[in-house]
Amino acid sequence: MVTIRMYNVGLGDCFLLRFKAPNQQRDRFMLIDCGLFRGSDAEKETLQEVVKDIAKTTKGKLDVVVATHEHQDHLSGFWYAQEIFKEKIKIDKVWLAWTERPGEPRARQLKDKIDEFSDQLTDTVNRLGIDLDPAQVVKNRRQFSAHALESVGSVLDFLGFDGADDTSANNPLPGNGQPPQKRLSINRKALNYLQEVAVPPENIVYHEPDTVTTIDGLPNIRVYILGPPRTDLIKKSDPTKQNPEVYNFAGNSRSNYAMMLPAWDGDQEENQKDRLDRMPFEPIYFMTNEQARQLVDPFNDDEETSGGKTFFQQYYANDLSEAGFDQRHRRIDDDWLFSLGNLALQLDGDTNNTSLAMAIELIDTKRILLFPGDAQVGNWLSWHDCKWEHPDTKNTTTAKLLEQTVFYKVGHHGSHNATLRDKGLELMTSPDLVAMIPLDEAFAGRKKWEMPFGTLYASLAIKTKGRILQADGKLSPVAVEAANLRTEDDEQAYTSAVKHSKARRPTTNGTDRPLWTEFIVR
Amino acid sequence: MYSRSPQETRLQTEHIAPTTYPLPPYRKLRGYAFDPSLSLEMDTADVNEVVYKVRWENELGDGPVGEYLEVVDYDPSSNVFYYPVNLNHAYLLAQDGLAPSESNPQFHQQMVYAVAMTTIQNMERALGRPLFWNGYRQTGVGANGEPIYDDEFVQRLRLYPHALREANAYYSPDKKAILFGYFPALYDITTGQLPGGLVFSCLSHDIIAHEMTHAVLDGMHRRFSKDTNPDALAFHEAFSDIVALFQHFSFPEVLYNQIAKTRGDLSAQNQLGKLAHQFGQASGKRNSLRDAIGTVDEHDVWHPATPKPTDYEAATKPHARGSILVAALFESFLTLYKSRITDLIRIATNGTGKLPDGDLHPDLVKRLAGEAAKTSRHLLNMCIRALDYCPPVDLTFGDYLRALITADYDLVADDTHNYRLAIISAFRKRGIYPKGLKTLSPESLRWDVMTRQKLTQLMDGSGDFNKLITTLKSKLFQASDITSRQESHNFFKEIQQELHHQIWDFGETSYFNDLTGVCLVDHPVWQGQKPVFEVHSVRAAQRVTPDGETVNQAIVVLTQRRKVTIDKNQDLTTPGAPTFWFRGGCTLIFDLTGLTLRYCICKPFLDQRREDEQRAYMQQRADSPGDRALYFGTPGMAIQSEATREPFAFLHR
């Protein structure tokens, strides 16, 4: 018997699994992720409260901690509540995807790209004067529109850099006389902690696809590792049916970051070369902002021929048309920011694809719990190539696993690209299917993200007969309607399997929610 | 005027031209026929560098900044400004501008200017009138509470050659500008691009022509950028591609080269039928960004595409759907070209029709090229002229087909070369049919010519309509005094206001409403909103037929809008119900010589079926956002999202 407890933190994953161990007194506990999206209300407090509850529930021992991938909405608890972890919880084993193994060449290739790119992207955004903490007032150095800044900032939040918490000592911004140092994101810090806490080092397991693993003391539980894939599918983050011949800008194809990212006139001399490397043309062709603005045209200071105005004053900085119409909006000061957002999106998808995806099997009842992390299209597709060579499992196929799935942790808070349709959800045909969505819709709405995605939610509702447990307690009309599909037995079984905590926590929309919601699979 | 160095300043001696010098008809500017990548391939290198002949602008300033365009080269992501090129510099005048170069931003400025002006010239030639950009619009409330719309003249479209670091280029209706991006080519050696080398979208003839066409189209039909049916944005894309494609045929050297290479068979793989070669390769495709006649498979082998009657139904995304229209028109071109050269081939082969192996005789190539150029010119003109015969809102491909046929009927009574048939058959092969037609003959596709009976009814029904035509004619008569585009804009704006007053004051409107499909009276569909309409535009068109006759037409466009809820079971009183603007309107084409209404092409405002279809479309679109929509808001959202502000940027990303 397994009890799946979803902590209703908001937009973030935190799942505690409690396994009944046969013939033993102590239950076994597995924690899958512990995080909350940046900028959520009472971020730290919520996570600390959750971790305290975990400590109490598990009596201070976690047998396995799984960190699916390097995103803040999955990891921040291991940083914000680290003290509580250290003090109250003993962590036995840590499970990570092979992509996190230090020194793993293929992983490094991928991760280095992502790291380097996200460093540059964050650095760029920093230099633009975007404060990475949205709660803070945006320092609008170049007067970008708030909308442009916000959309870029939101995506960067996935990367998990903490503006407010980091002291300037370990987070020097450029311009204070020191060369910029490599900063550690919250995610990195959380992972570092997990990699240190599991001793001896053999207790950190880097999982590979095509393998089956077990948990100590639980002979009746088998865990199939589905992803992340070793193949190029790891780079495929979006469905591209209409354009299959287009490869994404992922992995090795995205290498000339320098030219994708803006060049800055650095304050320091040593940046000059760097800057020129990032310029598309030789210096003889350009003038700086100041030269263009301050009437300094080095070759022409004759007021008569220039009409007292430089070319760019006349044709770019002319915020009023001749007829007096406001035409400031014709400038292009911040349009390129939207392409930064595009890059950030690709980055986001790439990291999601490194998710450790697992199918946990209850051997006695042949039931499967599916935890895909935030796997996107390529990761899902690769599962179907998996083979598990052990005699007990060699006939198992992913299609079979999906068919036996009775519990699905919905990927990426219900977004459109993290649940595969035809070779994923459509194959989950069990009449007992139940889904949990770790989502606070009001918060996602504030970010203008469509979570859960309408058509995905609708098919989930039918597949589960309305048995969708969403962290904010919301049940959409389609799901309510789909509840009519349940038989009396269904109804009874479902009602007895779901439990909510007495302890409650406040949510974004002003109401409060149980701290956790449980579902029991026998 | 700027000079670049003291040395150069000395060289610029006072140049007061004696008045006996004739004005040059055009300015010659060197540029790429396609894009820089084809200069690196042996068989196209020789012809890829061409000389654009651009209409001479006397007042052309640095930038270049002329009558229609201003090239402003600010690169915000590099945070620098590039020196504007001075095309009037004696050195540049003497050598047809700067030589093509990827590393000189001033050449980039020259290239965008040259191609953009070429596109403008082609459009103006076909339309028979000067072009206008979509103006600044303001809405306000007048002294008596009536709504006031102001439309301010935008003289120049702004071109930003290095606006973005991104594999994208787009026309921004809001900024009245085109933003071109540049980006590093993919690290993929199979594409033949320098890995990581920079690709500039502003050096691609096809991209410039494509974006320019968006801008021109938006200036003529500003409601075409509203995504009201699956064809709407697809048409914008398709039309822009068509203009870019047919412009390829206006370079004689290129045409000669490609015809020699394909031995006269333009339906074989060739550069003329492809768009944005470098852009496509550098962003990871095996082929050009778009190819009107074929595809490249995973083994890099090119195959001609075969049209299927299900093509149109199956494609839903704007670019995919648009490409079907492009393919249809390109096929019409091929059919016509083939039929026009059969006699030449017969002569060259002594009647066997079988060309001998090896190269064709240069004279034959020249003659074939001449036919190809002529055919493409005719077709391009047809395509552009058809814009005047389109309904002002909610355009479908079927409507456009009818507009094409009608426009051609009006100008060429006798279709000796079967242009119309070729077009209809190419559309039919791809399953593009106009709705509600019984047959597919050219006559039935033509918009209904106003019958005498209907006209009499209208005239008798209300004297107001007669007055309207008289006003129109007497006003348009004064058009010959206009000397500048600015004046012309204001002149037509005045007529628009005058017509608006007149129609507003119509006593009896029922006949007018029946005919035009507008609704000037209080009607339940308004759901309590005040009935409004706008005179969307008034244009005059003067064209000369192949027979030497002059056709004088006035085009008056009326549009209306009302708010409706996306969910049919809700209405405007439902709090928070998502809504959209439902638009109707009509294009009235008057024959000024005979002083009669000739066509009334309308999208009825009260059409319940159209309203329901649009509603379903809005709903379905809201259900399927792309990745960006997920993070940056969907177009349907009430907030002013990026998608609503920059419809084309969104489309291209």
Image: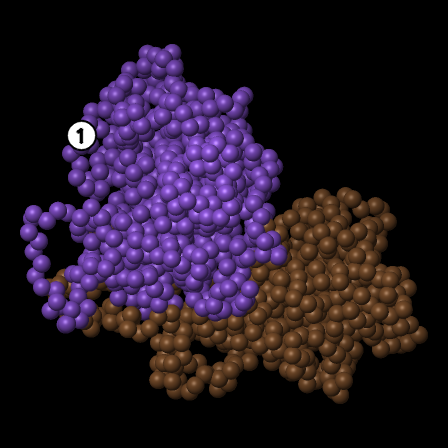
Chain colours: A brown, B purple
Q: Residue B165 location in percent, x, y?
A: 42, 64
Amino acid type at mark 1: Gln
Q: Residue at x 80, y 66 (%)?
A: A387
Most foreground residue, B596 or A3: B596
Q: Give x and y (percent) for residue A197.
A: 70, 84
Q: Is residue B15 left or right of residue A31?
A: left
B448 above or below B559?
A: above
The residue carrying mark 1 is B478
Residue B502 higher or lower than A104, as above or below: above
Residue at 43% of width from left, 34% of height from top? B347
Quadrant where the C terminus of chain A is found in the figure: bottom right
- For mark 1, give the secondary structure: helix
Q: Residue at x 46, y 24 (%)?
A: B442
- Which quadrant of the view contains residue A507? bottom right
The 10 Å Cα crowd at callout 1, few under 14, some 14 to 19, many 20 or more, is few
Tell whether B524 sits left or right of B553. right
Residue A488 vs A56, above or below: the answer is: above
Q: Is residue A270 above or below residue B495?
A: below
- Chain letter behind tag 1: B
- Percent across and percent down for residue A10 are 63, 64
Query: Residue B27 vs residue B183: left or right?
Result: left
Please indicate, yes or no, whether residue B328 appears anywhere in the rendered image: no
For residue B145, what is the image quadrant? top left
